[in-house]
Image (cartoon, rainbow, N blue to C red):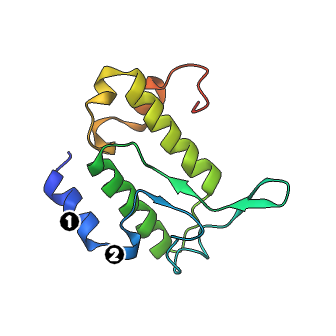
Amino acid sequence: MFDLTIARRLWDSLPEECRSDHFDKKTMPAHYRPAIREVNVGGGWTSCYLNFRGLPEPMTWEIAWIIHRRIELGHFVRVIETNAVFTLLRAAMHHDDECRSAQSLLHRSPDEWVRSAPEGSDAR
């Protein structure tokens, strides 16, 4: 069950440079770089951008903490797949009234988030 106080504590526990709703080459914390590899985005261009803007603030706290914790545990964060999840969450929130009122990832099951995104959207 979601608790706003706990979500805020998760956010507050992060180092200052890790408290963001997006990361790019310029703002990526140095200790995240080995775990968030740059991907080719066409031609000679690469990106390591993670964008979870546009989601409710408590949800961004949860996501920032999840990213941080996965890196602490030695996992990689895959840019394309991770951004696809953020796109799916935004699409579900835009399309579905129940999702629109959600403040936390915990307000819906993973399957409910996926089913709530519109068919044929880039998120699915």
Give how far across and how far down residue 123 sits, in percent.
57, 33
Give how far across and how far down residue 8 sits, in percent.
20, 60
Q: Residues under labels 1 and 2: Cα distance?
A: 13 Å
Rendered image: mark on residue 9: 1
Residue in view at x 85 percent, y 54 percent? 43
Observer able to see residue 73: no
Q: From the image, which quarter does the N terminus lie in?
A: top left
- Picture quadrant where residue 92 is located: top left
Q: Residue furthest right?
A: 43
Horizontal side, residue 119 vs residue 9: left or right: right
Q: Residue furthest bottom?
A: 30
Whichever of labels 1 and 2 marks the residue nearer the N terminus, that label is 1
Tell me the kind of residue under disc 2: Glu
Horizontal side, residue 101 vs residue 63: left or right: left
* Image marks 1 and 2: residues in contact by CB distance under 8 Å: no
Local secondary structure at mark 2: helix
The residue singled out by tag 2 in the image is 16
Local secondary structure at mark 1: helix
Give how far across and how far down residue 76 sits, in percent.
59, 66
Horizontal side, residue 97 vs residue 78: left or right: left
Q: From the image, which quarter does the C terminus lie in?
A: top right
Relative to 9, is 7 above or below?
A: above
Observer able to see residue 61: yes
Closest to the observer, 109 or 7: 7
Q: State the count of labels.
A: 2
Horizontal side, residue 1 vs residue 110: left or right: left
Tell me the kind of residue under disc 1: Arg
Residue in view at x 38 percent, y 30 percent? 93
Task: Rate crowding at label 2 as few (under 14), some (14 to 19) or many (20 or more) other CA atoms within 10 Å.
Answer: few
Rendered image: mark on residue 87: none
Residue in view at x 26 percent, y 65 percent? 10
